Image (cartoon, grey):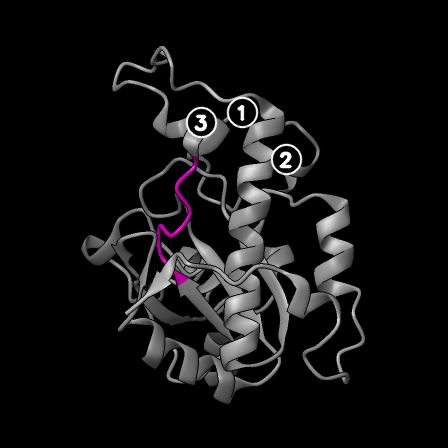
Amino acid sequence: MAEYLASIFGTEKDKVNCSFYFKIGACRHGERCSRIHNKPTFSQTILLSNLYQNPQNNAQSAEGALIPGKTMSDEEAQKHFDDFFEDVFVELEDKYGEIEEMNVCDNLGDHLVGNVYVKFRREADADRAVRDLNNRWFAGRPIYAELSPVTDFREACCRQYEMGECTRSGFCNFMHLRPISRSLRRELYGRKRHRSHSSSRDKRRKSDRFSR
């Protein structure tokens, strides 16, 4: 029985533990979910809830109509997102430790919208980041950070979305990850990890959106 329970843990067959929370670190039912959300006491991954504010979403009224004067081109939106991504990535890696992977949700559901997942190389760095970030602000808004059970983003992402076939649009219950530009990806992830924080990183701007 113990082996069977272990084999179905976090899957749809598990009637006790929430499979969505296990896979994506968030559940649309929140605290009202009928299944258990097993929050980790240690993890490499942290969740920064609703941190990214997509200006293209904010430019729409409650009825979904575009608000005149607040629209943004796709190129401007990508630049806005790249700036946000770089600010967060550099700040967190400089202060807390090496980042293996960082992802931002492009979903529209309240439990996923703007969620930022950061996977550190070391669990100790993730733990330190959570404890410190909950006392900090970003762009005038408080940061809500917690350890996340997500370790394999392939399991958390919507495969149909990656193929351009998801019919649930932004309200899918699996992650729709917003991509950064290729040049920024090469810059952030292409560096030799063993070198000290110097050269190109020191030339980048320091974010003024983080505060205490």
Please provide percent x and percent y for residue 93: 57, 74
Q: Which residue is mark 3?
A: 56
| First-in-chain label (3 vs 1) | 3
| First-in-chain label (2 vs 3) | 3
Q: Which residue is mark 1?
A: 167
Amino acid beneath label 3 = Gln
Above or below, 187 relative to 128: above
Which residue: 58% across, 49% down?
Answer: 157
Name the one closer to the observer, 210 or 16: 210
Mark 3 crowdedness (10 Å alpha carbons): few <14, some 14-19, many ≥20: some
Amino acid beneath label 2 = Gln
Q: CA distance from mark 2 to mark 1?
A: 8 Å
Can residue 177 be seen here?
no
Q: CA distance from mark 2 to mark 3?
A: 23 Å
Is residue 209 rendered to the left or right of residue 90?
left
Which residue: 34% across, 15% down?
Answer: 64
Is residue 189 rendered to the left or right of residue 7?
right
Mark 2 crowdedness (10 Å alpha carbons): few <14, some 14-19, many ≥20: few
Which label sits in the foreground, 3 or 1? 3
Q: Which residue is mark 2?
A: 160
Amino acid beneath label 1 = Thr
Element at label 3: helix
Which residue: 52% across, 46% down?
Answer: 175
Q: CA distance from mark 3 to mark 1?
A: 20 Å
Looking at the image, do the residues carrying marks 2 and 1 touch, with CB atoms under 8 Å apart?
Answer: yes
User: Bounds of the magenta span?
Assistant: 48-54
Name the one closer to the observer, 207 or 9: 207
Which label sits in the foreground, 2 or 3? 3
Can residue 179 be seen here?
yes
On-image quarter of the C terminus: bottom left
